[in-house]
Image (tube, rainbow, N blue to C red):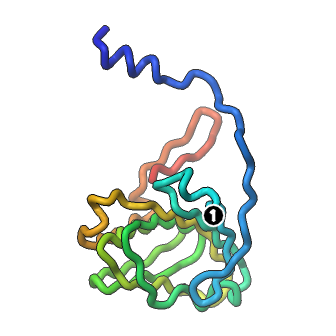
Amino acid sequence: MNNTAANSKKDTVTQSRQIEQLFAGVDTQDGAGVKLTRVLTQQLQQRLDPYLMLDNFKSDNPDDYVAGFPNHPHRGFETITYMITGRMRHRDSAGNEGLLQNGGVQWMTAASGVIHSELPEQEDGAMEGFQLWLNLPAKDKMNDPWYKDFQSEDLPKYTTEDGVDVTVI
């Protein structure tokens, strides 16, 4: 067995990890008053870098989300948004536009900077999803912005023997 294979085998986790600490999400508002729960907060950011924030937005009350996230700037990180249910339109200063909808993923790399908006394209019903903010490495922070929508039907899916459905993002 070569040294690389031996190191790889030695690094394999063979037992479950213990829960170190539990954190409750913090109810907050962002954008034009969208109600959300922020799971990763400032007290965890340095420890969990490159993970900056994880937000969950969930409501069937349009007053909680209908104003959305009007034009605002981002720089030096990227966001990955998974829409469980609902519809949100993305537009940005780099000329990108896309519709995030049920089961889809939006990946936006702000890098050197972008101004964008995410506005609901629904006025009633449930809207739910998650947004993960990832810090970019210093060498990538001044790259050009990038954006892509992935529709639900384009994402790889797998069902375990126990009937658990998995979507790969």
Q: Is residue 32 above or below residue 145?
A: below
Question: Label 1 crowding class (10 Å Cα cut-off): few <14, some 14-19, many 20+?
Answer: some
Q: Which residue is mark 1?
A: 41
Q: Is residue 67 above or below residue 77?
A: below
Residue type marked 1? Thr
x, y percentage for residue 154?
A: 39, 58
- Front residue of 52/1: it is 52
Q: Is residue 60 above or below residue 48?
A: below
Quadrant in the picture for the N terminus: top left
Left or right of 127? Residue 145 is left
Name the residue at 54% across, 25% down.
Answer: 13
x, y percentage for residue 27?
A: 73, 73
- Front residue of 33/149: it is 33
x, y percentage for residue 167?
A: 50, 51
Name the residue at 70% across, 90% down.
Answer: 63
Q: Residue furthest top?
A: 1
The image quadrant that residue 23 belongs to is bottom right
